Image: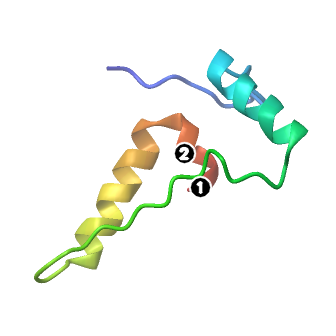
Amino acid sequence: MLPINRKGLDSRPLSFVQERLWIINQLNPESAGYNVPVAISIKGKLDIGILNKAFELIIARHEIYAPYS
């Protein structure tokens, strides 16, 4: 799979789902209707370096998360 070159683009069009969520948020910005709280219990040792690398790979692979990098 080849990466898409997005350099030089200031904005991208929203998908229909993203547009719908944006409109709903504009109508009621205080709503938490689309926030999904999740907790994960991890037992045993946790290698923070490997966990960070996993998140970096997810962010690199899915451009929707790029603002969080």
Please tell me the numbered disc located at residue 9.
none
Mark 1, residue position: 68
Mark 2, residue position: 65
Indicate left or right for 34 with 3 as reference.
Answer: right
Circles 1 and 2, Cβ within 8 Å, touching? The answer is: yes
Mark 1–mark 2 distance (CA, rounded to whole Å): 6 Å
In the picture, the quarter occupied by the N terminus is top left
Q: In this view, does 7 lie above or below 38?
A: above
Where in the figure is residue 9, as x and y percent of width and height?
75, 28
In the picture, the quarter occupied by the C terminus is bottom right
What secondary structure is marked by label 2? helix
- Disc 2 residue type (three-letter): Tyr
Q: Give the residue at x 74% y 24%.
A: 19
Indicate left or right for 9 with 2 as reference.
Answer: right
Between residue 8 and residue 38, name the one nearer to us: 38
Q: In which quarter of the image is residue 20?
A: top right
Between residue 40 and residue 59, name the one nearer to us: 40
Q: Give the residue at x 28% y 67%.
A: 51
Where in the figure is residue 21, as x and y percent of width and height?
71, 32
What secondary structure is marked by label 1? helix
Q: In this view, does 8 lie above or below 42?
A: above
Between residue 40 and residue 13, name the one nearer to us: 40
Q: In this view, does 67 lie above or below 61?
A: below
Q: Would you call the spot at circle 1 few (<14 residues within 10 Å), some (14-19), or many (20 or more)? A: few
